[in-house]
């Protein structure tokens, strides 16, 4: 069975806490579960008999292992591998005071970029923003999840991302693809979940706060489409294959408001990106040593 009892339990708690089936499905999708496993978890979570079975199993086995982990070492998270040991010249520091923001040119090859663009073209649907039910002009791009079992070539890319940051890929969300056409944008927002909001309760409390964002531009739009960090008034212009990454948290583990950013409107041509977000909870160690 590809979805554990822990996750069925999580699904039930989430529904009990007031999340809708659709929201719960999105959260499970973000964990990389296949549609059939999500359907199974939702069905099992709604069944009274399975609930009673689960309660007695839990009472019988003390100290059931939870999928949640204690907090990570946020200071270590603020010193990722790319600062410590990525070959000189590859990484450009765009900012290291108000926020930690880096760029890496030619992170992906032209061929990798083209393959990803094709996958996004074939799979993308209108974006949803956490907490916004309706499609709005706040985030008007199209998105898709690039799951490894559907797109095996993404495994190598995920590995390069995780190795560059020195983070365990299991602590990362499923890689997302985004496609903007002229006029489309993603208005100013933080990537972290804002404490006190329903999204924080739904996503961060269940599966952890977002830590690092790793975003890769797959092409260069003819005009517009930069990523604007308003608090430091810096706009990064897309270059095919270039990655940018930033730490959404401070070394204390608190969200860093200086990370607020926007995907500026594309003025001509298309813009394609992929993004991977890491969390502060996961299985195994958050860090990899290599
Ligand atoms: O499109 C961009 O440049 C930014 C995208 C973004 O901020 C996001 O997906 O969270
Ligand atoms: Fe963002």
Image (cartoon, rainbow, N blue to C red):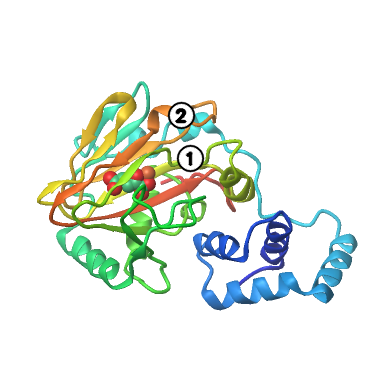
Residue 77 located left or right of residue 60: left
Neighbourhood count class around disc 1 (C-alpha, 10 Å): few under 14, some 14–19, many 20 upward: many
The residue that label 1 is drawn on is 192
- Residue 175: image quadrant is bottom left
**Can the viewer see residue 164?**
no
Dot 2 falls on a residue whose secondary structure is loop
Asked if disc 1 and disc 2 are in contact, CB closer than 8 Å, the reply is: yes
Q: Is 135 drawn above or below residue 49 in the view shown?
A: above
Cβ of mark 2 under 8 A from ligand 2: no
The residue that label 2 is drawn on is 256
Query: What residue appears at the point 16 percent right and 52 percent down from the top-left corner?
Result: 240
Residue 218 located left or right of residue 133: left
- In the rendered image, the residue lying farthest to the left is 222
Q: Position of residue 87 (x, y in %)?
A: 25, 39
- In the rendered image, the residue lying farthest to the top is 97
**Can the viewer see residue 40?**
yes
Residue 182 located left or right of residue 213: left
Residue 200 disc label: none
Q: Position of residue 64 (x, y in %)?
A: 79, 57
In this rendered view, identify the residue nearer to me: 216 or 199: 199
Q: Position of residue 206 (x, y in %)?
A: 63, 50
Query: What residue appears at the point 44 percent right and 52 percent down from the top-left corner?
Result: 129
Q: Is 6 drawn above or below residue 278 in the view shown?
A: below
In this rendered view, identify the residue nearer to me: 40 or 201: 201
In this rendered view, identify the residue nearer to me: 281 or 133: 133
Q: Position of residue 78 (x, y in %)?
A: 45, 31
In this rendered view, identify the residue nearer to me: 150 or 44: 44
Disc 1 and disc 2: Cα gap in Å? Answer: 8 Å
């Amino acid at each position: 069975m590809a979805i554990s009892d822990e996750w069925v339990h999580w699904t039930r708690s989430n529904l009990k806490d007031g999340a809708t089936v659709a929201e719960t499905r999105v959260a499970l999708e973000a964990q990389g579960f296949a549609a059939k496993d999500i359907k199974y978890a939702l069905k099992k979570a709604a069944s009274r008999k399975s609930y009673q079975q689960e309660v007695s199993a839990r009472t019988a086995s003390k100290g059931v292992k939870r999928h949640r982990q204690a907090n990570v070492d946020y200071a270590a998270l603020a010193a990722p591998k790319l600062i410590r040991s990525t070959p000189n010249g590859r990484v450009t520091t765009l900012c290291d005071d108000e926020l930690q923001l880096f760029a890496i040119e030619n992170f992906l090859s032209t061929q990798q970029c083209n393959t990803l663009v094709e996958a996004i073209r074939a799979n993308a649907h209108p974006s949803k923003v956490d907490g916004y039910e309706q499609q709005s002009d706040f985030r008007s791009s199209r998105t898709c999840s690039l799951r490894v079992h559907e797109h095996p070539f993404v495994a190598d890319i995920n590995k390069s991302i995780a190795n560059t940051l020195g983070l365990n890929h299991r602590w990362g969300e499923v890689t997302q693809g985004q496609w903007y056409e002229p006029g489309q944008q993603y208005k100013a927002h933080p990537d972290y979940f804002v404490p006190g909001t329903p999204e924080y309760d739904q996503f961060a409390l269940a599966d952890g706060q977002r830590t690092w964002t790793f975003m890769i531009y797959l092409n260069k739009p003819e005009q517009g489409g930069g990523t604007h960090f308003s608090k430091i008034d810096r706009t990064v212009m897309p270059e095919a294959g270039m990655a940018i990454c930033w730490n959404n948290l401070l070394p204390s583990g608190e969200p860093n408001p200086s990370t607020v950013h926007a995907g500026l409107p594309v003025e001509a041509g298309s813009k394609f990106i992929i993004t991977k977000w890491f969390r502060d909870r996961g299985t195994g160690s958050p860090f990899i040593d290599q």
